[in-house]
Amino acid sequence: MTELPNLTTDRPPAMPGGAGNPAPHHNRPTPQPGDWLWDVTSRAKTAEAGLVLLPHSGGSAQTYGNWAQWFPSSVRVVAAQYPGRGARYGQEPATEVAALADPLAEVLAGLDTPLHVFGHSLGALLGFEVCWRLQQAGCPVAAFYPSAAAAAHTHRPAAVSPARLTDDELLALLKERGGMPEDILAEPDLIDLVLDACRSDMAVTDSYSYGEEDRRLDCPVVAFGGDSDSAVTVDRLRRWRELGTGHSEIHVLSGGHFYLHDHMATLTAVVRRHLQERSPLL
């Protein structure tokens, strides 16, 4: 297991194409056909690699609105938009992982660029299933980056499903895990929307099953997690290395379930290294 030091600064590095210039606001992702993928940046006309970002429970494509600034302009950064979020608000939310993984894999298979997939929490379980489907379709990804989730083959439903908690109980849980931004807490109507989204996504997580088949990805699995995450033990995070081949890694950072908010420089530096190792022209 690789223990990573804290960096003294969390600013984007200087990069070609202006990627190192932090934007004053989050970029507004642009929808792609079918609304499953949103471009976080339009800088890359001819991409050498693609980075696919899968949100956590209750999250949306906008969660990753500032990620493009951490990567070179030759990397196309896209985020998934789940049904029931953002412009897809009126659509029925998914009730199982396959309802998300199947269409996402179909869309991603049409992208003509080496793909790297990052998923946080629910996005990590979904990411494994998307990567597996792409591999089965003859389109293996270059690397998979699960974050803040137990390895897919160790996943077990919670003894008490968070999806069944009262509004007050669920809100308290989200605050404890650091998953409720202050600007949302100030807007009661937004809180209700987030709680509804979290409930549907947590039900998806609870229903997830790795299955009986021994499934491994033909790519490195580079996992991240917080050392004080009450939802995921380091031991279960470490077991992601069993589901990949090649140079798989486990990175543990200080913090809880949303450790990444304090460690963007460290996390994205690791992802950039893998992007550059597998796409030398970056």
Image (cartoon, rainbow, N blue to C red):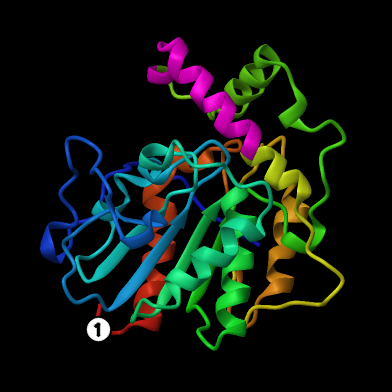
In x, y percent, where is residue 214? 81, 77
Quarter of the rendering containing residue 3: bottom right
- Mark 1 Cα shell of 10 Å, populated few (<14), some (14-19), many (≥20): few
**Magenta residue check for 195:** yes
Q: Nearer the viewer, residue 41 or 21?
A: 41
Left or right side of 42 for 32:
right
**Magenta residue check for 130:** no
Q: Which residue is at a point 18% across and 42% down the rendered structure image? A: 23
Report how many numbered discs are placed on residues in the image: 1
Q: Nearer the viewer, residue 147 or 198?
A: 198
Q: Which residue is at a point 70% across and 78% down the rendered structure image? A: 216
Left or right side of 140 for 80:
left
Magenta residues, start to end: 183-200
- Whether residue 251 is visible: no
In x, y percent, where is residue 95? 67, 46
Quarter of the image containing the C terminus?
bottom left
Element at label 1: loop
Question: Relative to residue 65, is residue 131 depicted above or below?
Answer: below
- Whether residue 274 is visible: yes
Q: Which residue is mark 1?
A: 281
Quarter of the image containing the N terminus?
bottom right
Q: Nearer the viewer, residue 64 or 99?
A: 99
Question: Relative to residue 19, is residue 24 depicted above or below?
Answer: above
In x, y percent, where is residue 168? 66, 12
